[in-house]
Image (spheres, rainbow, N blue to C red):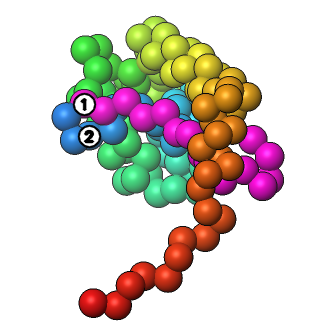
Amino acid sequence: MTAKSKLKLHARIYCGDEIAMGPGKADLLEAIDREGSISAAGRAMGMSYRRAWLLVDAMNRCWQAPLVETVAGGGRERGARVTDTGRLVLAQFRGLQALMGALGRSDEYRALEGAVRGEPLPARAN
């Protein structure tokens, strides 16, 4: 997508009204995988532990198997890990994002991009 592009396509997968997976949740999964804990992943992404935990909780409630498992306790084994299901969902979601990126080269995308205004007209007064 060029700097002048007016269209932005975002993949989001819904479970009822809840976002089961979107770009931010995918980034969080990658951060958990890299950091080994929800709190460290949240810090790396500039979000609170509570926010990161709420996003993980939403993902785990929306998929048939958990995407993240936590290990409680004070030893070296404490933290979180992305499950095999989480890795699979993440890979499939990133693949979907790549496919959507290719849409930016389609005739339909270019036609819509050419037809949309750069800024909306002023709202009409009633």
In magenta stretch: residue 49: no
Q: Which mark is residue 15?
A: 1
Q: Which mark is residue 18?
A: 2
Q: Which residue is drawn at 68% across and 49% down?
A: 114
Residue stretch rendered in magenta on the structure? 1-15
Q: Quadrant of residue 4?
A: bottom right
Q: What element carries label 1?
A: strand
Q: What element carries label 2?
A: strand
Prevailing SS of the magenta stretch: loop
Please identify the residue farthest to the bottom as the structure is shown.
125
Q: In which quarter of the image is the N terminus?
A: top right
Label 2 environment density (alpha carbons within 10 Å; few <14, some 14–19, many ≥20): few
Q: In which quarter of the image is the C terminus?
A: bottom left
- The three-letter amino acid code for the residue at tag 2 is Glu
Q: Residue at x 34, y 90 (%)?
A: 125
Q: Position of residue 74 (x, y in %)?
A: 42, 34
76 or 87: nearer the viewer: 87
71 or 4: nearer the viewer: 4
Q: Where is residue 98 in the image (x, y as percent from the top left)?
A: 65, 22
87 or 117: nearer the viewer: 117
